[in-house]
Image (cartoon, coloured by chain):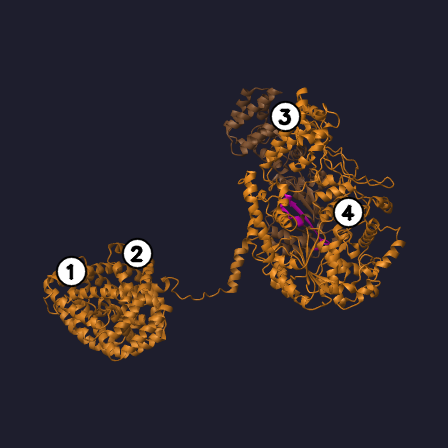
Chain colours: A orange, B brown
Amino acid sequence: MTDVNCLTSEHIATASSPPGTPPRNAGTDPVEPSSPFVLRAPPSAKSKLILQNMEEVLHSVKQKHREKHKRKREEKRRAALLAESGSQEKPHKDSKPDKEKPQPLREKSSQENGLKNGKRRSSPLKCSTPVADHQSIMKHFAKAGKPENVSASQVQTSASAKSKPATNVFEFMMNARNRSIGVNEGGVESPADQEDEGSGGGATPQTKRKQLLQEWNERKGGAKRRLADEARGEFIELQMEQRAKRLKKMLTKADQKEVSAPSSAPTEPAVKRRGRPRSRRLSSVDAAPVISVETKKPDPETEEFLAKLSSPTKKRDSLLGYFAKVESPKEIIEKHTIAIDTPPMDTPKRRTQRRKSQQETPNVGVESTPSGRPRRSCAGKARYDYDLETSPAKTAAKGKVQKADESVEIIDLDSSNPASTPKKLAPLFVRQLPKPSPDPSVLKARQAFLQSGVPDKIRQEQIRQKNHEQMYEESYEVFPRVSHVGYESYVADDEPLVLPFALREEDESTGITTNTSSSMTSKRRTKTSGFTSCLPSDFTSSRNSSAKRDYAILPQLENKRGFVKLWKNDFDRFPTFKCYNQMREKYRHFSAIDSSDDTQQVGESFVVTRRSRRSMEQRSLDQNDEEAKPPSSAPNGELLFTEKYKPLLFEQVLVNLTPVQELREFLASWSGSGGSNRNSQTMDDSTFDFGNDSSSVGVNSNTMVLVGPSSSGKTNAVFALANDMNFNVLEINAGMKRTGKKLIQELQEATQSHQIRKDSKAAGSGSSQQLLQKLQKSGLKAKAKVVEPPSEERKSLILIEDADIVFDNMDAGFTDAIYTLAASSKRPVIVVATDPNSAHLQRLMQQNQIHFQAPNALNISRFLAVLSLMENCPIELDELISLYLYNAQNLRKTLMELQFYIQSGGDPTGGRTAAVRSPSKSSHSRLATVDGSRIHQRLFEFFTSPQNILHRIPFPVDFGLLRLNLNDLISNSPLLKEPQPPGGGRNTAKRKSRSPKKAWLSSATNTSSSPLATLAAFYDNISVAALMDSSRDCSDRLQWHLSEDMAHLLVEQALQTGLAAKECPYNLFDKPAQRVTICEYLGNGIMRSASAKALDFEPNLRSICRSERERAGQERKSSRFYHYLRNHTVNVTSFAMEYFDTACGVFQASNHSDPPADAEEPRD
Amino acid sequence: MPEDTEVQVDDKRNNLPWIEKYRPVKFKEIVGNEDTVARLSVFATQGNAPNIIIAGPPGVGKTTTIQCLARILLGDSYKEAVLELNASNERGIDVVRNKIKMFAQQKVTLPRGRHKIVILDEADSMTEGAQQALRRTMEIYSSTTRFALACNTSEKIIEPIQSRCAMLRFTKLSDAQVLAKLIEVAKWEKLNYTEDGLEAIVFTAQGDMRQGLNNLQSTAQGFGDITMENVFKVCDEPHPKLLEDMIQHCAANDIHKAYKILAKLWKLGYSPEDIIGNIFRVCKRINIDEHLKLDFIREIGITHMKIVDGINSLLQLTALLAKLCNAAEKH
């Protein structure tokens, strides 16, 4: 940058010599095209190299200048003959030939510019400019006059006389060049320029230059205007050149032998000269870009284009930048070659031929010969590199120089450069200055201003949120401590629980009595229009308060034991009493805890620790009669049933025993290897001997995968066993940030050491841990020394929950972390997963796997019955089974709903009025009651039937269920029975399904409204309903689907009026085994025909499924197709992967046991 | 029913939409699904409510019920102890892992048997990942925090979440229930109303209380009096009166008169979907022979299927009329 700076400043110096001296101005313009350019290059580049070069060159240059000037003076004299006047008159003279010849125009403009420049430019420059420069400028001016004259004469005088010498000279030049490598004039000039500049630059101090530059920048506006003019001139001149070229060709053809005196007609050769180098450049590799530029210029189109461009400075600048880019390397290389090659002999003749370069070529010659050559070349190279990299602005300037010396439109470029280039170059080339970062206070003020409109509330909210988030960031830990909620006494506002609005009698009975409803409708007609179901009574009394349903907390049942005794006989093979005792203990314990204040101590906990078990039995005998009651402040307690009644010891596991036992054996090996014999002592009364187990179970694998459907007790089993066998549980679940890195970090300590600090025990807690602590705190204080196990003996166990769920974007490396843990951990790692097909767990699953299954419905119902008894609300087994099955054997959900039902008061009325009935055919007898206390019912109904409008059939019609229930429904129909003997209903259904036709045809002929007709109508209706129903997609319930509505109403009406069924027993839970066909999940529209499915799609799909599953089992990341398939289950909601998995499961199972045909069988 | 105090504050919230203005604050004011609501009110006083999911169509009071429960259960500490997130809040995995979890860990002093409540409204719009991240959190902090979810379709709640909650299904409100509330509101707003006007609103509401109240308000503000004409001016539907007449004509086997009505409706520019829907709803309540009605409904259903399939020309509707007449003739 500096060198450019100095160049420009030098140029300025030359240009800014006192305004009074006209020759200097003239000199700047056309005569020495090169120097101004370089001088005016933007002050961006600073290269020491170039500076040095320039300084070296300086001295020699000054001398050369003097020589040059002498020569020039001679030329000047000659020129003076032709020229009309001196420098100051020139502009006038130039203006005349404007129209004829572009060149003069250009000159004029440039001269004007120069004048302006001179006037504008500041005085300090004057002081700095060396005398030599002045002289040289004077010479330039003189010279400048001459070429103009020449050009003028060239046009006016006849071509013949002048052309001869031109050709001669030209040939001479050619020869000279051919001797050397191709030489570019432009290149010759530029070094000269530099020298010129250098001479100026050496003298002037840098600070001044900078000042100057700044001043120039201020005058940018003037420069722009100038630019416009000059551009015009430039192109006119270009055209002139072209014309000249053409002329030259003609001349050379016509009079090649004529030779004229070099002095008289120098102009044409000059033109030729200019033409030639271009062709030469074409041949040379370097020149290519230049040519392109040149060829562009003469085009009329581009002229226009540029003319257009010339008005807005910005565009032109950008254009210039473009040129610069293209030309700069070439130009520099040219420079280089010229420095080496230009023979001094050229100079005299060239002088005559050339217009502009006359003066300069000699310079070059002189310069290059003695000392400068090698250095120059070096400098050129160096500069080349430097330019390209650092100072685009400068290269641009050079490019302009190059262009200018060919087209002799120098000044416009010059003038533009200092002012505009730094700013307007493409951003690529401009070195980025780091923006001064605004003062923080300023920023703050700005922000405050922006937020000044925001109300305080929002601002506070923001601040609070920010703090909150910060808190998250800081205080987050993988094993967070669970904070307890402290309770204060609370006075509940005891509102009477009155049902505000109950269904009308009429509403509830709609289904059953059609007569009344019709009479009602006729009544209704009188007052209202009757297209809604509103009754006149609804208008008169805004609220129907007749029916109140009171829900209150159930009273304590007194004789629970009596119930259990009665039930014991029914519950064969169910440990009724064991269950009862356990539950009672828990119930009492928790209600005691609930009732007690935190400060008050509760009696010993029997539930928690094994040690207390014997004493528990003793005590329980004593305390048998006293029943703890829940506190009045919180009659419902404060725990969920799922927490309250979950097993805390192995013995308390009542259902689903086998997998838990397996898990226990696995864990026993670890606890045995701990090396303490405490276990064997304390557990002497347990059924298992741990001493033996420790060696038998394979210790080599430390990982166990628990797989099973949700709520099958996987996690609870782990916690119960951990509690039983004295493990600490470090739990990782999906609710945590579980990137692999974090996991490994957090678990490093736990996995690599066998023991864990005591205080980390709390951190690794799940809820049961917390519960345990609570219990220990409250219950074990009294006997702490006896009961509490020595804390340092607790070992840790790593439990990874939800391992089959990996969020791709959140849990990076989670899977790898699991495998790393499994490989390196010295503690048992238990992985819990729901999906047995999860691809990334396959390797672990192959090692060690325990399958959990949903517990058996019968056992669960008994368990639930005892539980509900403990909660003072004995419930029918039927109801429990139905609910359990309705929830798809989800125990936890059933427990939740049971809690909801029981704690909100059970069934207050005890009557059952529902039109939709739970299965009537269940074989279980009613549970016996004691003391006339009621068995609660309607549990199932509450969770299944809609409450606002009573339907006979649950609202979205499930046609699979309907088909199942058809037998019962049809057997209920009086219309079908009439002609038949009483047992006929069942017969009809059976026959209908097989070969009904003949049997029915006979009977149908008899009666007018035959059962066959009604049945046919019924089936017709149902089939239409099914058709309507199939068109909906059930995924979105946001919209009310009319077709759904229609289908339901149609089915109901068909049952009610078509069959005249009084009541519709409806079996809700007994679903048939789902048929598994993959094609069902591939989108409906494509494959309609069954044969296509069976023959084409299914087998392929099957084989894909099978192979993909196998592959997924073997390699972790190759399950691509499997997942493709999974994604293509179009018509299934996004979460319903299980269908596909079951599909896969079917095939896999069939692989192992049966031929696949068996698995396909149910599909047909 | 809004209380007197609310009426005094009325001028303050004059500009509120009525669905907000009359949003129930107490269980008593909630209309519909009485069984469930009454049971919930038990929990509101006794505490220890389990995690619940309330599923049901829009406008039946799911959100209102949950908010009532939370407000009564927690009283003054509602602000600290309730975290309410709906679909407009971000509820990605991050939020579940941080915000909800932090909330669950927070210490709030509450009376015995009370728990902090996380309300996740429109839970079916939560991503699967977010729900998965929620599952264990629900369990671990169950001693301090309970969850209440509201959603339209329970199918979109993943199974593990469903298994941790008691599922309560709300259904569409019956017409009488909607009507009762409408009368209440009309009285509070001192509207002039006719019975058929309210009935018309009930008809347009289709068991959606929100829709009903909105229609009531727009009719009242647009025309003042609640009459059937005004209501159907606001809620532009094929007029049920006309349709009723049409079906009666069909039942009387008079296809010319029936067709005139249909042509008129068609000329008015109603879409065939609207027409067939209203025909169905009118036919549901129309006073004709039950067997005939059954046949009618079947025919309407078939035509509806065709229309849904895209064959929605006047011809199809005319064919429906012909079929209806044919069915009536057979009877």
Seen from the viewer's position, the closer of residues A350 and A1025 is: A1025
Q: Which residue is mark 4?
A: A859
Residue B168 at x, y percent in the picture? 69, 43
Task: Using the numbered discs, state the Cα–Cα distance from disc 2 to disc 1 in whole angstroms.
Answer: 30 Å
Task: Using the numbered discs, state the Cα–Cα distance from disc 2 to disc 3 in whole angstroms.
Answer: 83 Å
At label 1, the amino acid type is Leu
Dot 1 and dot 3 within a common chain:
no
The answer to whether residue A262 is magenta is no
Q: Which residue is mark 3?
A: B293
Is A872 left, or right, of A297 in this rendering?
right
Q: Which residue is mark 1?
A: A247
Decide: is A405 above or below B168. below
Examine the image and state in which quarter residue A486 appears.
Answer: bottom right
Task: Using the numbered discs, state the Cα–Cα distance from disc 4 to disc 2 in whole angstroms.
Answer: 93 Å
Residue A314: give its label. none
Is A1063 left, or right, of A230 in this rendering?
right
Q: Residues within 10 Å of mark 2 (few under 14, many from 20)?
A: some
Mark nearest the camera among 4 and 2 is 4
Secondary structure state at the residue bearing disc 3: helix
